[in-house]
Amino acid sequence: MEPSTDLYDAWRAAHREWGPGLHEDGFGLETTDEVDSVEGFATWVARVQSRGGTSRWIVEDGQVLGGIGLRHELNERTGHIGYGVRPSARGRGVASWALGAILVEAQALGIGRVLLVCLADNPGSAKTIERNGGVLEGIRGPVRRYWIELPAAGESGVLAEEGADS
């Protein structure tokens, strides 16, 4: 679902679970964002909603499980897509499902090839990307770089099935 101020308490619970720092990939959180107050959170959500790209939160039963973002333009350092799943929701296929869904959105936008990067020492993320068709380009420093070829809009293609392990 799109980021929403209605999920302030649920988002803060996920944020607390991650612990200190800005490692919640997929939320677009920056060091200058103040999300500890309702007003600061609302300002951040408005910024996320207004910037270029597509942002989605992964929500289940009112809980924010994670976030995923699609950059409509290629960023060579961070790729087209960033995602993160809170620790308590990992291993359930949440990331694979979300990545499959955002790939459908990328395909609809006419993006034919997407770059994803993950830390080289993150086998769970590498597996998620590979499950969604990611082909390893190589390892550059601390990151693995993957490309996923998407069929043209309207053509069929293989994307992750719901419920796959992440």
Image (cartoon, helix red, strand yellow):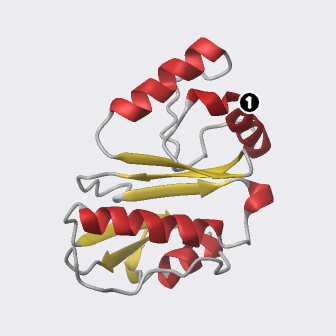
- Residue 41 position within the rendered picture, expressed as x and y whole percent measured from the top left: 58, 22
> Can you give x and y, in whole percent of width and height, for residue 18 in the image?
73, 45
Viewed as shown, does residue 128 lie left or right of 104?
Answer: right
| Viewer can see residue 12 | yes
Q: Residue at x 63, y 76 (%)?
A: 123
Name which quarter of the figure residue 38 lies in: top right
At horizontal 73% and vertical 65% (from top left) the residue drawn is 90
Q: Is residue 123 left or right of residue 155?
A: right
In the image, residue 1 above or below residue 3: below
The quadrant of the image that shows the C terminus is: bottom right
The answer to whether 35 appears left or right of 118 in the picture is right
Q: Quadrant of residue 80?
A: bottom left
Q: Which residue is mark 1?
A: 9
- Name above or below for residue 162 compared with residue 29: below
Residue 47 is left or right of residue 18, and the answer is: left
Q: Nearer the viewer, residue 108 or 145?
A: 108
Q: Label 1: how many residues lie within 10 Å, few (<14), some (14-19) or many (20+)?
A: some
Residue type, mark 1 in image? Asp
Q: Position of residue 76 (x, y in %)?
A: 29, 58
Res. 143 visible in picture: no
x and y percentages locating residue 36 in the rendered image: 68, 20
Residue 57 to residue 156: above or below: above
Q: Which residue is more in the foreground, 41 or 22? A: 41
> Considering the numbered disc 1 on the image, is that residue within a helix, a strand or a loop?
helix
Residue at the image point whose x is 37% and y is 48% from the top: 54
Corner quadrant of residue 52: top left
**Closer to the camera, 144 or 114?**
114
For the point 41% across and 27% down, the residue is: 47
Q: Is residue 8 above or below residue 64?
A: above
